[in-house]
Every structure is written in structure tokens, then in C-alpha cells.
Amino acid sequence: MKKLFTMLAVLAGLSMFSVYAQEEVAPISEEVATEQVEAISEEPAPAEVEEVAPVEEQQGGIHQALKTKFIEGGAGFMSTVALCLILGLAIAIERIIYLSLATTNSKKLLASVENALENEGVEAAKEICRNSRGPIASIFYQGLLHAEEGLDVAEKSIIAYGSVQSGLMEKNLSWIGLFIGLCPNFGFMGTVIGMIEAFDRIQQAGDMSATIVAGGIKVALITTVFGLIGAIILQIFYNFILARIEAVVADMEDSSITMLDILTKFNLKK
């Protein structure tokens, strides 16, 4: 997990560096494009000018617009919002993969365990649980491990290990909740600081110019927009993970009750 976070942080730093490099190169490219348009406009054939315009529009798009707004919002707060989003998504993806691996066909596993208990004994049932992945198989194994000590001991073992598995599934969810709160907070902080800078410019200019006010407010609000977008994305992943955990826990509880019934029948036959 730590290696994953380190790799993502390095990638985020490289992406920020490329954005700054493009920001420095952008004015030069605009001057070159202006000179090309002026040179074309001096030529008598208007058809060539019409061919250049669509190419320039195709080079833009959503990616270019997002990159431009990211640069306008300021490096400091926009970088923190992006870092919170990246780390939150990394944890969310790791949890989704973990929960996907934790999901098993509990009915098929119960049928296999019951068949092994009736025909081959406890050790065969344990072997099936050891070879099966997921928390339900681990809970069954703990119940079978203490089956010879009595149903009360097996039940307590199943309940205790079920709580452990529930805690493992909810691991690192608090970090996602933290990043959900940090994204808009960093955005709001950037907005407040941007507004302060806008009023400083007005004070220095000595005039309430609409251009100065509109430009400063626009740049200040960009951080809030990106912060809210990051929080919304992480909130969707967070609720999806909670729903998956609830489904797995419900399956664990239902399967545990069925497993105790199987152990009761097995002890009665003995």
C-alpha cells in the first residue's frame, strides 16, 4: 500500500511539472500561431485560412480546457486538491479490488463443506475452507477448528472472527472520508485567498474596475469548483464501497448461521 501511494505521488509530481512546463511554453506557441495567422491573412486566397481554423479547434477540447483552468487556479491549492483526489482514488480502488476478491459463492461453499463433513469428516471440510478465498471461508475454518470443543465455542469463534473480517473490509475507509473533506476545504481556502488577492489588486489600482474584479473572482472560484468535483468523485466511490461491504457482511452473517446449523447436525450424528 505504501509503495502504491509513493508511485502515485511521484506520478502526480511529474504531471504537475509537465503542466508548469507547458504553461511556460504556451505564450511562445501563441505568438507563433499569431504570426502564422497574420501571414496567412496577408495572402489573397481565403480558402487557406478556413482550413487552418478547424485544426486549431481540434487541438483544444476538454483536456486543454481543464489544463488551462488548472493553471489559472494556482499551483499551490490546485496541486493539493489533485493530490487528495489521487490518494483517495488509490485507496478506493484498493478497497474495491479487496472486496471483489472477498466476494465468494457462499451457497456453493456451504454445500461443499456440508458434503465433506458428512462423507470425509472435519479435516476434509477444513481443507476446502483453506483452499477457498474470502472472509466467509476463513470464518468457516475458524468454526470447524473449534467444532470438537462444542457448539458454544465454535459459535463464539465464528462471531469473533466475523468481527475481525468486518474490520479488515472497513480498513482505510476513514482516509477516504478525510480526503472527501479536504478537497472542498482546500478549494474554499484557495477561493478566500484568491478573493483577498483580487481586493489587493483593486486597492493597488485605486479603481473599481470590472475587469480586475471579474478576473480575480473567476480565478478564485476555480479552486472551489475543482475541490467540489474531487469531493463528489470520492463520495461516489465511498458510498459504493460501503454498499459492497454491507452486502458482504450480510452474506457473512447468513452463511454463519447456516454453518452453525450444519455443525449442530454433524454433532448430533456423532
Image: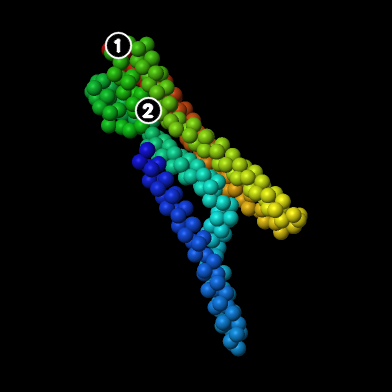
- Left or right: where 39 falls relative to 18: right
Q: Residue at x 60, y 88 (%)?
A: 44
Q: Which residue is mark 1?
A: 149
Looking at numbered disc 1 in the image, what kind of residue is underneath it?
Answer: Glu
Number of numbered callouts drawn: 2
Most extreme residue toward the right, as rendered? 208
> Which corner quadrant holds the N terminus?
top left
In the displayed structure, 143 sits above or below 207; it is above
Residue 14 in percent (x, y) is at 42, 53
Residue that carries the numbered disc 2 in the rendered image:
136
Residue 72 or residue 5, whichever sits in front: 72
Q: Quadrant of residue 170?
A: top left
Mark 2 surroundings: few (<14), some (14-19) or many (≥20) residues within 10 A: many
- Position in image of residue 77 (x %, y %): 55, 46
Is 131 displayed left or right of 5 in the figure? left
Which quarter of the figure is the C terminus placed in? top left
Name the spot of residue 209 as percent of width and height, x first: 75, 57
Q: Mark 1 and mark 2: span between their CA atoms?
A: 21 Å
Q: Give above or below for 46 relative to 129.
A: below
Q: What colour scheme does the image use? A: rainbow
In-front residue for pair 224/217: 217
**What residue appears at the point 40 percent right and 41 percent down from the top-left corner?**
5
